[in-house]
Image: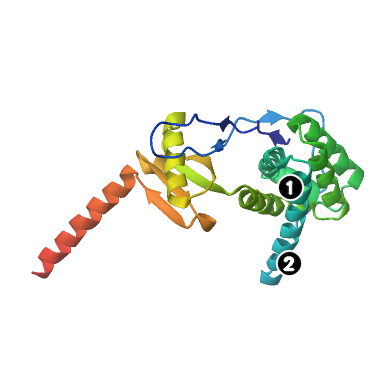
Amino acid sequence: MAAIPPAPVALRPASPSSAIVVPMSFSLHRLPSAPRRLCSLRLASPSFRGCRRGAAGAVIMDTAASRYANALADVARSNSSLEATNTDMEKVDRLFADPEVQSFFANPTVAPDRKAELVKEIAASCELRPHTANFLNILIEMQRIDIVKEIAREFEACYNRMTNTEVAIVSSVIRLEPQDLAHIAQAVQRLTGAKNVRIKTVLDPSLIAGFTIRYGPSGSKFIDMSVKKQINDIASQLDFSFTSHSLD
């Protein structure tokens, strides 16, 4: 059964009196979120095992995903729905994370009409904009629905470029308060100079306490404020000290 997560929470903090500039758009995404269920349409379908792609196939897939994502972004920008379409694609991305959904749509033995029927139900349940639902039907028609998650990832990149948005993934043991996340967003904006900052939160018990922030191109920048790092640093220092004394 397909699980439909609710729309992400959006926070827009008021401008502070301090010198740090608040992002014009600060979005908070908590993952994973509590799902809602599609009740009326089962995904039961004949067994299907997708083919494996080699390196060349992966490149072709990524190129196709980029083309489709750019086309959707152009449509969204032309009708002033870029923000709403980005929200739609986030819902689609989380939905297709369900292996049962992926298997159903990737199965060539399932009739296109059955897939279109499910798209219609998904659009209603997730409150997708008409052009997003139509886009999914086009992917079915073009036999490209199997790369919809790659398209969603490419669309997010398009959206971020068009809106000068920096995405930061904040990992913590417990959920951080909105004001704490707002301060993190301000810091990331100051570091990157981005017009907007979007925060995605992840719970990671291994950190013990504190938090980490990953941002930048492909998550290349990393700030570690966790207790786990402090413990590892202390352990490394003790190990170095023990090694030095052993050599003496």
- Number of labels in the image equals 2
Q: Name the residue carrying label 2.
A: 60
Q: Residue 121 carries which label?
A: none
Position of residue 131 measured from the top left corner of the image (x, y, whole percent): 82, 41
Residue 177 in view here? no
Nearer to us in this view, 229 or 100: 229
Say whether residue 172 is left or right of residue 149: left
Which three-letter amino acid code belongs to the residue tagged 2?
Ile
Q: Residue 102 carries which label?
A: 1
Position of residue 186 measured from the top left corner of the image (x, y, whole percent): 44, 40
Nearer to us in this view, 219 or 159: 159
Of marks 1 and 2, which one's residue comes earlier in the chain?
2
Which three-letter amino acid code belongs to the residue tagged 1?
Gln
Q: In this view, does 153 lie above or below 205?
A: below
Distance between mark 1 and mark 2 Cα atoms = 20 Å
Say whether residue 14 is left or right of residue 34: left
Say whether residue 8 is left or right of residue 95: left
Position of residue 36 measured from the top left corner of the image (x, y, whole percent): 68, 28
At x 67% / y 54%, what residue is drawn? 154
Query: What secondary structure is found at the residue carrying circle 2?
Result: helix
State the quadrant of the C terminus. Answer: bottom left
